[in-house]
Amino acid sequence: MKQSRVNVIRVFRSPLDHRRGRLQAGNLVIPCALGRSGTSHSKREGDGASPVGRFKILQAFYRADHGPRPRTGLPLKAICPNEGWSDDVRDRRYNRLVPLPRSTSHEKMWRDDHLYDVVLDIAWNRGPIIKGRGSAIFLHLARPGFLPTEGCVAVERRMIRRLLERIGPNTRIEILG
């Protein structure tokens, strides 16, 4: 049976642990990890907070060598070993996918810890990009035990594919404070 697309994914912060929450996409409700500093209305680079607001989901990335191509209505791109994400405010390509190697600070998209095996690119600080407001806010795979992220939203591997099937280019993610 084909899933109908959801227009809004809502992320609710737990009242008991601000670093955890639940994600709701239609009738799919799943636990998630949030930033180590919880959520913030005034996100800054390196603060460890997940930004509060409603955002477009620009695209999804996946590691083709770590599983099948996900089914989704989002634009989808296979991650390459020579790709990173600039988190250096001095870099003219700040908060963008960048080629590696690179002399400026960046995150590797091709990770050994599997967190980025499937990644949704949340349009935080993207139009226009303001240096220092934070970069690389993704929805990605959670660490065991739902340990906090550096500001992203993270869910279990088995749930991210179910989520991807329900979303498309018109889906927004709303992170609540």
Image: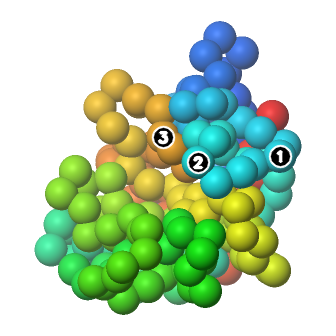
Looking at numbered disc 2 in the image, what kind of residue is underneath it?
Gly
In the visual, does 162 lie left or right of 74? left
Image quadrant where residue 166 sits: bottom right
Looking at numbered disc 1 in the image, what kind of residue is underneath it?
Ser
- Closer-to-camera residue (124/133): 133
Looking at numbered disc 3 in the image, what kind of residue is underneath it?
Thr
Percent position (x, y) of residue 70?
36, 72
Percent position (x, y) of residue 127?
80, 79
- The answer to whether one can see residue 44 in this image is yes
Q: Residues within 10 Å of mark 2 (few under 14, many from 20)?
A: few
Q: Are marks 1 and 2 in contact (CB under 8 Å)?
A: no
Residue occupying the point 81% across, 34% down: 177
Residue occupying the point 72% across, 70% down: 131
Percent position (x, y) of residue 75?
53, 85
Residue occupying the point 61% across, 86% down: 92
Q: Earlier in the sequence, mark 1 or mark 3?
A: 1
Local secondary structure at mark 3: loop
Which label is found at residue 42?
1
- The answer to whether one can see residue 56 in this image is no
Residue occupying the point 72% across, 15% down: 15
**C-alpha gap between disc 1 and disc 2:** 12 Å
**C-alpha gap between disc 1 and disc 3:** 17 Å
Residue denoted by label 2: 46
In front: mark 3 or mark 2? Answer: 2
**C-alpha gap between disc 3 and disc 2:** 11 Å
Residue denoted by label 3: 149
Q: Is residue 105 above or below residue 81?
A: above
Q: Earlier in the sequence, mark 3 or mark 2?
A: 2
Local secondary structure at mark 2: loop
Count up the numbered dots: 3
